[in-house]
Image (cartoon, rainbow, N blue to C red):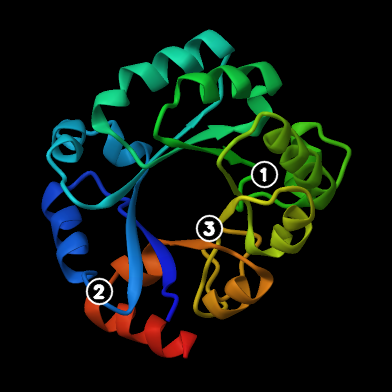
Amino acid sequence: MKKNKIFVACDSNNIQKVKEIIQKTQNSKLKIGYKFGLEFLNSKNGRKFISKLKNKIIFGDYKLADIPNTCVSTIKAVSDLKFNYLTIHISSGLNALKAAKKVSGKTKLIGVTILTSLDNKSLKEIGYNKAVKSIVIKQAKLANKAKLDAIVCSPMEVNLVKKVFKKEIITPGIRFNSKAGDQKRTLTPKQAYKNGSDWLVIGRPITEGNIKNNLRNLINHLK
């Protein structure tokens, strides 16, 4: 039977906390990977910890957003960590995406669309005059053109993205209930998989409180 795939977000700069998250999320019912964001990646011992992490699916959530040369240099600078997945903002532009893909090697390069903390109102404040869904479709087409390996989008846009991007779709913005926190575009795990997500990224709903109980609740929710 095909296992549901989850990236557990290790959003902490505390090594002991991250070790606890990894230890307590080991189970045979889900395929688990670990996502490390900027908080951990920029912490004093974060890089060292990742360099010693063996036999785990690891995701470097750098969310690169820069000129082509800087994106390329950064990917080369972290290549020794052997990430399975690494993120770049699609808004960096086609040239940066192509250049990054060229040097990413065995690491799957993930294009990040509009962040799940933003909605139409937020985009208007930044200066965009198009709706979230319209921009995400355009970005998915660009990711396809750059031959990226995967896309990050909210669970609400998965159906649209699947029409133009046929590789892996990774979705954050996952909540078990109505407590969205700082996220704007959220769905439950079951809804996200139903829409066609390949991987879910889940942080606080698993890592805050009793990790094993939270994971058990997730498995029950998906039945």
Q: Is 122 situated left or right of 87 in this image?
A: right
Which residue: 53% across, 75% down? 189
Using the image, determine if residue 155 lies above or below residue 85.
Answer: below
Does 139 sit above or below residue 202? above
For the residue labelled by badge 2, is the local secondary structure a helix, a strand or a loop?
Answer: helix
Marks 2 and 1 sit apart, C-alpha to C-alpha, by: 29 Å
Circles 2 and 1 in contact, beta carbons < 8 Å: no
Give me the C-alpha separation between circle 3 and circle 2.
18 Å
Tell me the number on the disc at residue 114.
1
Instruction: Say the numbered circle drawn on residue 211.
Output: 2
Which of 67 and 116 lies nearest the eye of the viewer? 67
Left-right relation of 97 to 126: left
Extreme residue toward the top, this view: 69
Q: Measured from the top left, where is residue 140 in percent x and y?
A: 73, 42
Kind of residue sitting beneath label 1: Ile
Q: Could you classify mark 2 by the number of other residues whose Cα lies within 10 Å: few (under 14), some (14-19), or many (20 or more)?
A: some
Q: Is residue 94 above or below residue 52?
A: above
* Residue type, numbered disc 3: Pro
The residue tagged 3 is 172
Q: Nearer the viewer, residue 163 or 121?
A: 163
The residue carrying pointer 3 sits among few (fewer than 14), some (14 to 19) or many (20 or more) residues within 10 Å by Cα, namely many
**In-front residue for pair 50/204:** 50
Q: Residue furthest right?
A: 129
Distance from disc 1 to disc 3, alpha carbons, whole Å, reads 11 Å
Residue drawn at (35%, 67%) of the image: 31
Q: Is residue 210 visible?
A: no
Lower sequence index among marks 1 and 3: 1
Sequence-wise, the earlier of marks 2 and 1 is 1
SS class, disc 3:
loop
Identity of the residue drawn at 52% across and 8% down = 69
Q: Position of residue 15 (x, y in %)?
A: 14, 47
